Image: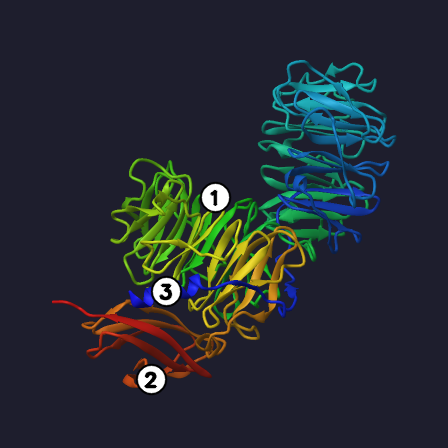
Amino acid sequence: MHRFATILALLLLTSLSAKSQWPDWDRLPGPTGGMISSFAEIGGDIIAAPTQGAFYHSTDGGASWEFLYQASWTRSTATLHGSADGMLYALGYGGAYLSSDHGVSWTKCNPGGTALFAASAPDGTVLFGMRGSIAVSTDKGESWTEIIPSPGATRDYKVAMDVVGNWYAGAYETGVFLSTDRGATWTAIDTGLPNNAVYMVSVPAGDALYVGLNNTTYRSSDQGSTWEEISSLGGLNVYTIQHAGGNIMFAESTGGMLRSTDFGASWEQGPFAAYPMSNRIFANRNGTVLLSSAGRVLRSSDQGASFSISDAGLFVQNISQILSMKNGVLLVGNDGGGIYRSTDAGASWECAAIGRWGVSVQQILETARGSIYALCDGDILRSSDGGVVWTELPRVNATEISVSICEDRDTLLTAISDGSLHAYFESTGTHVKLGDIVPSGGIAAAALTAQPGGPIVLAGTDRGLYRSTDNGQSWNLVLVDGLPQWFTEIAANPTTWWGPMYASTPTSFFVAADDGSTWMEIPNLSVSAPRQLTFYKDGQDFAFVDRERILFYARLSKDWETLPPLPFQGLNAIAYQLPSPGVWAGRLLAGTATRGLFRSVQSLLNTPAAAAVPAGFSIAAVYPLPLSTGANALHLQLDMESGSNVTMEICDMLGRVLQRFERGTLPAGRSDIALALDRIPSSMLLLRVHGPGGTAQRLLPVMASHP
């Protein structure tokens, strides 16, 4: 208890200081791409609206991209539309906006409802499709007139115009309509169509009308008087058709992207067969085609005959999680997208095969045994190959979702929304229920952590903080200052059982020095929204995010410091970068909402133990901890970049060697080692491992065993 009291006293005496000498941040070249909700062309520029992010633009036909504009409403943009008179429109659930300067500045307009579809004529007339009506403007969005093609429509109207000035409108379960007098009157033109489940109304080349219906698509060359079915689109729902010049056309459908080389008479996947996860396409009549596919943006300059990655500068939006692994491997997850992977310390990136896109990544963690788990939209994904390929675990409960995960030695602990805790065993691929965190009902959210090598588990729920001392079988409510407290995040030292634990509420920051049984708010540390609680791998340094600033605690200097802010707003996630070839261990990675991934120029590490560990050599895990005086074995895992002779020593705190183990040459990679122990004293010991280029060390707490 004296050690715990000392740790807590040191924390309570700290004060917040500015680190004025901190250098600038470097932006990594990726990850780039992401999910795109819409493309548009205006005055030769191409504008991209990433899902839930900022706008980017390209002045070279999509070959490269630059940041353009960001506002709160841009996160909900569903449609970008460029008109021939130079106006650019952005539509979504956050409102309708217009720009007359290619997207540099924007003004909100008021069409009278939520607009999600748009069409325009060369004279500047623009139509917005809304729920039950159409908004028309002839003065660049200054004023709007409401038009109702058919009374009683309950879905959004899709709108289109042809080259001779006819207007078309169609709504789901309402029908398809034509106006030849600029919306004054409307005529139903759906006679001969098999159903009225209208998904699309399009005039891609300015003449023939296409209507996408439930499981089929029809075309009319006479303004809807007669219709013919496009047999090659049968069984598919088609959402847009675009023209890329000549006889080349493209379609988005439930069967993926399709291409036509005969002006829409027949369709096939063609080059798109290699991109089954495509979600958006853009084509213009000069032959440029852009494809948003599986988290990357692809470009074709030959009317879609071939594609190559072309998203340089278009950064992935809303980075939510960062995981740094050995040998320079980085994983980045984002909201509304997927998982991205780098094997060269962030110099280049690829998309991981997670099987689906558009997910929100809530957690990514690596276990001591090398498996990687990701919590995405309530489901758990697992990778056993360093994050290349992922498989989805069966749900713990078919009617409930997972709300938090953490590692507990050789198992994955999962808190699910009914308030229970489960353990997933890799060896059998099964979930086993351990106990109920919240006995009286479900939980909407949880922050879960387990002490390494011990049976203590903490769960911060929306009903308060719960603590278990028997690996999750039974739980007790922990009161903070006599009241239940919802800790939104909890972090335990990843390597030892005796270090401090941190926890955050939506507005406060707490510390515990007794395995989480009592908590105190840290004085003289003013915070407003603490999150992303992050230990370095050896537990010696700690950082967290508070709105747009990063606070850092160095165990050697025993002080809290504020790091200079990123050059842009939107700080979302942080992680320490682990040792890897050519990368200084302990540099901090910071993920942003719209500007990509940044890395600190300098390392934050200033502890002798961490600085002594050479790149590519580390102690990945030690267990069981704490040891007992009667223990006869100690297990450890070593990570080495290259094969090397290794010697291990058990020392007392004065540096005297109690036991030495020679293991000869171990191979590169991860090695599992068991050391046979002689009787050891009840005290704090030190494990030293002499490996390639240096020495790594780890504290070994020892407790007296009782008969």
Task: Kindly identify which numbered label has been placed on residue 171.
Answer: none
Task: Give the image quarter of residue 604.
Answer: bottom right
Q: Quadrant of residue 705?
A: bottom left
Q: Which residue is mark 1?
A: 377
| Residue contact at pointers 2 and 1, CB within 8 angstroms | no
Q: Which residue sits furthest left?
A: 707
Q: Give the colour scheme shown.
A: rainbow
- Nearest the eye: 290 or 479: 479
The reply to whether residue 78 is in sight is yes
x 60%, y 50%: residue: 295
In front of the other: 350 or 686: 686
At 31% from the left and 54% from the top, the residue drawn is 517
Q: Position of residue 421 (x, y in %)?
A: 32, 46
Q: Residues within 10 Å of mark 2 (few under 14, many from 20)?
A: few
Residue 560 shown left or right of residue 514 in the figure: right
Give the mark nearest the N terminus, 2 or 1: 1
> What type is the residue that disc 3 sits on?
Gly
The tag earlier along the polypeptide, 2 or 3, is 3
Residue under numbered circle 2: 655
Question: Mark 2 and mark 3: span between their CA atoms?
Answer: 21 Å
Quick one: 573 or 154, which is closer to the camera?
A: 573
Decide if residue 487 is on the left or right side of residue 334: left
Q: Which element carries disc 2, helix, strand or loop? A: loop
Mark 3 secondary-structure assignment: loop
Q: In front here: 547 or 323?
A: 547
Image spot of residue 489 (x, y percent): 44, 51
Point out the residue furthest to the right here. Answer: 123
Q: Amino acid at mark 2?
A: Gly
